[in-house]
Image (spheres, rainbow, N blue to C red):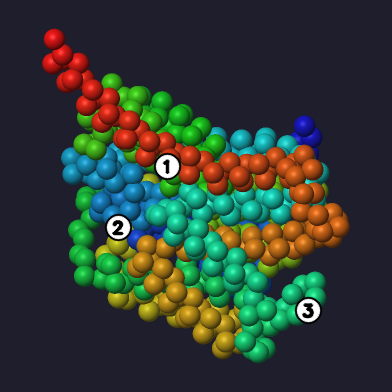
Amino acid sequence: MDISPIINGFGVVLEPDNLLYCLVGVIIGMLIGVLPGLGPGATIAILLPLTYGVGPVPAIIMLAGIFYGAQYGGTITSVLLRLPGEASSVVTVFDGFALAKQGRAGTALGIAAIGSFIGGTVSILGLTLLAPIVAGFALDFGPPEYAALGVLGVLLISSVGNGHKLKAIIAACVGLLLATVGRDTFTGAERFTFDSLNLAEGIDFVPLAMGLFGLSEILYNIEERHNQVHSPAKVGNVWPSRKDLGRSKGAIGRGSLIGFFLGVLPGGGATLSSLAAYAFEKRRAKQPERFGRGAVEGVAAPETANNAAATSSFIPLLTLGIPANATMALIFGALLIQGIQPGPQLVAQHPDVFWGVINSMYIGNILLLIMSIPMVGVFVRILRVRPAILAPITVLITLLGAYTVNNQVYDIFLVIAFGLLGYLMKKLGFEPGPLVLAFVLGSMIENSSRQSLLIFGGDPTGFFTRPISGTVLALVLLVAVLPLIRKALRRRRPAEEPAGRADEPVEENTP
């Protein structure tokens, strides 16, 4: 393996401007993680217009820092307030808040910081080793393979999204429909434009993302939390004892591996990784009853896993051009805005972006470890600011950011429309993530499919004759059919069990 690109990547990261953007990104990420309800997805959507004026390397380094920085920030509210700032920190509430009630909030935060650093670092090493291999393999991809991958990505993300699977699939279908709005790339015909010149150019990604993730989260957050008053727990000694470190080292190691592998999977992400790591530790524990009552392993495992997953989710984005979760879809859009197409050619065409972003994570994790413990007191003060004060400021920044994209008032109306749509979706139990992911992948699926059909002379069976696309489509069928098979088996088992039980008394009473 040629390590010269990796070394050059460190040279890119250590440039003063890029270091500054890395620092800004992780600080913003930690702050956003502390604010319940907003999250990295909404923040990245709001800040997308600010990336126009900087180069692709500092822009993506900053957005990446926001993403993995937010994972630790969410821990602070989980431990101190029993209020997860991030979905991936929900599991941390169980034992983190219990430790805080015992006067050990500092221990919980310290273990979380150490686990986050180790999990993130292990995942970055895996990213450094595996990403070029995956990218080299993906050089054989053509339009049929991209079309198959896009379909698999949408299906997986909609299938494993939070909430009801049917609702996730419906949201993904709406995203695919929105991706078709505008002029047909091949024929120039207008589709779903309703004679509007603004819609003729299609729906811009930035207003859609800012509305669905930014404005909708603010509206929902105000309604859910504006009447709640919390009193943060006191933070004592932040550095954990040798005994706590001994109990946590196994959980940190296993959480790193679980987070890395689940983060690579489309739809896996930090939330699923933290749940899986916590469940695994509880199942293998000699005293599982300790979990939920202040077990340090119950903080170490999920916090390590969610940071490892946040890092490894960059592998499918950078090497295959497929976002593994909703936040990756926003970073995908940021790369497209910069004129860079994520995918197999990224390593060869833009090595400064590829290795600059990966190597910036080493620096970012060190900065997070250094800053997280001393800044806990600052974050606790931020938690005392009323949402009624923060919300109007955030809305103003969101709308101004949308206007600066094209200097059109029309984009502000788009943000408001998608903000209301996102708010209604959350109220009805629909997640906006599958919609945004399908919207991002929709154009790739349509263009690649039509290019493939031109190559195959209109014969759709050509997708199955190519080894890679045929294998991917077989996985698509498997993912689609597997839930139906499981459902059929569950219906069959209850029907068989009563029959067996009914026969037993008859045999006993027979002389």
On screen, residue 62 above or below 197: above
Say which residue label 1 marks. 487
What secondary structure is marked by label 1? helix
Residue sitting at 27 percent across and 43 percent down?
94
Q: CA distance from mark 2 to mark 1?
A: 46 Å
Disc 3 marks a residue whose amino acid type is Gly
Residue sitting at 18 percent across and 20 percent down?
506
Say which residue label 2 marks. 380
Q: CA distance from mark 2 to mark 3?
A: 55 Å
Is residue 350 among the parts visible in the rendering?
no
Residue sitting at 24 percent across and 45 percent down?
97
On screen, residue 339 above or below 345: below
Say which residue label 3 marks. 188
Disc 2 marks a residue whose amino acid type is Val
Q: Give me the disc on residue 116.
A: none
Nearest to the observer: residue 278 or residue 474? 474
- Looking at marks 2 and 1 on the same chain, the residue that comes earlier in the sequence is marked by 2
Q: Quarter-wise, where is residue 63 in the image?
A: bottom right
Q: Residues within 10 Å of mark 1 (few under 14, many from 20)?
A: few
Q: CA distance from mark 1 to mark 3?
A: 44 Å
